[in-house]
Image (cartoon, helix red, strand yellow):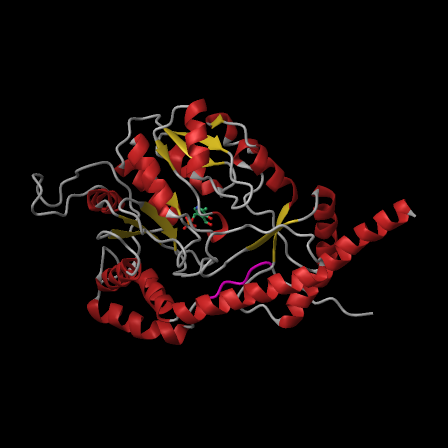
C-alpha cells in the first residue's frame, strides 16, 4: 500500500533574512522606523512603476497597514454620507464587509458570475434595478482580476464610485482604464508579501491624498493646505506601514518575477495532476487572463456530497483543505443582519461544492500527487457507486 504524503494547505513564501538585511541596515542607519520613511517611499515608487506599465493616465498610490484598513479608509475618503449602501459580492473574505460596516455604511450583498465567480458590471446593473446603492466594491476573488474598462463604463454611466478589493490580485489586476481605484494586500499569504501591509492605488490623486492623511490619524502634512501642518484635518486612524514591513516588501519586489513564475508553474502542475486524476469532473474559476501569481487553488466538485467525502478523506491523510470565503456573507450570523441581501443563487451553488486545495510555491511533486490521488480516490468511489447502481 502506498503511504500517503501529508500536505499543508498553505505555506507562506517570504524573503530570507539575508535578503532583508541590506534594507534593515539602511533603515537603522536612517533611524527612521515608520511615518512614511525612505524605504516605504521607495517601495511606493516601485509599486507605482509597476502599475505605470499598464495605465492610461497617471496614478497615485499610498501604502496602508493592511488591505482591511485600506478598504475602510478608501470608503472614508469617498466622503459618502453615513449609512450609504455599498454593493459587494456575497462570495468574498469577511474583511470586504467588515470594512464597509466599520466605515459606517451598509453592505448590499449581490450574486457573482457563474464562470468568473466575480461580481461583474452586468450584475451591478441588474442589482441597481432591485436596490439603490452608492458605491460598489467588486472583489478580485482568489486573485482573479477585473477588466477595468467595464467598471469605468459603469462608473461613467451611473456616477457610482467603484473600488476594487484586489487584496489577492497583485500582478494580475491593473488600472488600465481612465478611472479606477484598487486596494491590495501585502499579507504574508499573498503573492507580494510584506508580513502585513497593503496599498491603495487610484487614478484619483485627491482620493489617495485623503487616504494617506486618514492613515496618519487625519493630520495635515501639506504646507500648501489652509490648515497648519500638524493640525487634525479629519478623523483618521493609524494605518501606516512601518519601515520594517517596507523592508520585507522591497525584498519581495526584488524576487517578484521569479516568485510569480514559480507560482504559475506549480499551479499548472496542480491543475494537470487534478485533471488527470478526475478528468472533466472539476469546475474551475474561469478568468479572462490567467492569474499572474496564484496564491490559492479552489475547485468545484461535482456536488456537496463529493466535497464532504474529499474533506473526510483528506482529514485522514493529513491533507489541508479550506472552504475559502464560506459561509457566504449572506449566511454569516454576525454580518447578514447588518446587510441588504439580494438573491444570490449562483454564489449559493458555488459555496455548496467549492473547496480550497493545498497550494504554495514550494509544493513538491509527491505532495501534488498526494492531493490528486485523494481527489481521484474520492471521485472513483462515486464512479464505482454509480456503476454498481446501474449494474
Ligand atoms: C478579498 C480580501 N479582502 C481583504 C482581505 C484583507 O487583507 P489584509 O489581510 O491585508 O487586511 C483579504 C485577505 O485575505 C481578502 O482575501
Q: Is residue 358 magenta?
A: no
In-image side of 129 versus 384 (left or right): left
Residue 74 location in percent, x, y? 30, 41
Q: Is residue 12 magenta?
A: yes
Whether residue 333 appears in this view of the structure is: no
Q: Residue at x 26, y 52 (%)?
A: 56
Q: Quadrant of residue 181?
A: top left
Give the dominant element type of the magenta stretch: helix, strand or loop: loop
Relative to 172, does residue 260 appear above or below in the rendering? below
Relative to 107, does residue 189 appear above or below in the rendering? below
Residue 344 location in percent, x, y? 55, 32
Residue 205 location in percent, x, y? 21, 46
Magenta segment boundaries in residue numbering: 9-13
In-image side of 378 versus 175 (left or right): right
Q: Residue at x 53, y 56 (%)?
A: 296
Please state which of residues 85 and 281 is positioned toward the viewer in this rendering: 281
Relative to 235, does residue 147 appear above or below in the rendering? below
Q: Quadrant of residue 130?
A: top left
Residue 212 location in percent, x, y? 24, 47
Relative to 39, does residue 230 appear above or below in the rendering? above
In-image side of 368 versus 103 (left or right): right
Q: Residue at x 34, y 27 (%)?
A: 84
Amino acid at each position: 500500500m502506498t503511504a500517503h504524503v501529508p500536505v499543508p494547505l498553505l505555506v507562506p513564501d517570504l524573503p530570507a533574512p539575508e535578503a532583508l538585511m541590506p534594507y534593515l541596515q539602511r533603515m537603522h542607519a536612517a533611524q527612521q522606523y515608520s511615518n512614511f520613511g525612505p524605504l516605504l517611499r521607495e517601495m511606493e515608487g516601485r509599486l507605482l512603476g509597476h502599475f505605470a506599465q499598464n495605465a492610461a493616465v497617471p496614478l497615485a498610490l499610498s501604502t496602508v497597514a493592511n488591505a482591511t484598513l485600506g478598504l475602510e479608509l478608501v470608503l472614508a475618503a469617498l466622503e459618502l454620507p453615513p449609512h450609504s449602501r455599498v454593493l459587494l459580492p456575497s462570495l468574498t473574505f469577511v474583511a470586504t464587509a467588515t470594512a464597509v460596516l466599520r466605515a459606517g455604511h451598509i453592505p448590499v450583498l449581490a450574486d457573482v458570475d457563474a464562470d468568473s465567480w466575480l461580481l461583474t458590471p452586468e450584475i451591478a446593473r441588474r442589482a441597481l434595478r432591485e436596490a439603490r446603492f452608492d458605491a460598489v466594491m467588486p472583489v478580485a476573488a482568489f486573485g482573479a482580476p477585473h477588466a477595468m474598462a467595464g467598471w469605468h463604463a459603469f462608473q461613467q454611466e451611473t456616477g457610482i464610485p467603484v473600488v476594487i478589493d484586489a487584496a489577492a490580485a497583485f500582478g494580475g489586476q491593473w488600472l488600465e482604464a481612465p478611472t479606477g481605484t484598487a486596494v491590495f494586500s501585502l499579507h504574508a499569504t499573498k503573492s507580494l508579501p510584506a508580513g502585513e501591509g497593503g496599498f491603495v492605488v487610484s487614478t484619483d490623486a485627491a482620493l489617495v491624498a485623503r487616504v494617506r492623511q486618514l492613515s496618519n490619524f487625519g493630520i495635515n502634512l501639506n504646507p500648501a493646505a489652509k490648515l497648519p501642518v500638524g493640525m487634525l484635518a479629519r478623523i483618521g486612524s493609524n494605518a501606516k506601514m512601518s519601515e520594517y514591513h517596507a523592508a520585507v516588501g522591497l525584498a519581495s519586489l526584488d524576487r517578484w518575477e521569479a516568485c510569480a513564475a514559480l507560482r504559475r508553474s506549480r499551479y499548472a502542475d496542480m491543475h494537470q495532476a487534478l485533471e488527470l486524476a478526475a478528468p472533466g469532473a472539476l469546475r474551475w474559476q474561469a478568468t479572462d487572463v490567467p492569474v499572474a501569481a496564484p496564491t490559492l487553488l479552489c475547485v468545484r466538485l461535482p456536488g456537496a456530497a463529493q466535497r464532504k467525502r474529499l474533506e473526510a478523506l483528506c482529514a485522514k491523510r493529513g491533507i489541508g483543505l479550506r472552504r475559502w470565503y464560506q459561509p457566504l456573507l449572506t449566511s454569516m450570523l454576525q454580518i447578514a443582519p447588518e446587510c441588504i441581501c439580494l438573491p444570490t443563487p449562483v454564489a449559493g451553488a458555488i459555496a455548496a461544492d467549492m473547496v480550497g486545495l493545498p497550494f504554495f510555491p514550494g509544493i513538491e511533486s509527491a505532495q501534488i500527487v498526494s492531493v490528486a490521488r485523494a481527489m481521484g480516490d474520492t471521485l472513483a468511489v462515486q464512479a464505482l457507486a454509480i456503476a454498481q447502481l446501474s449494474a
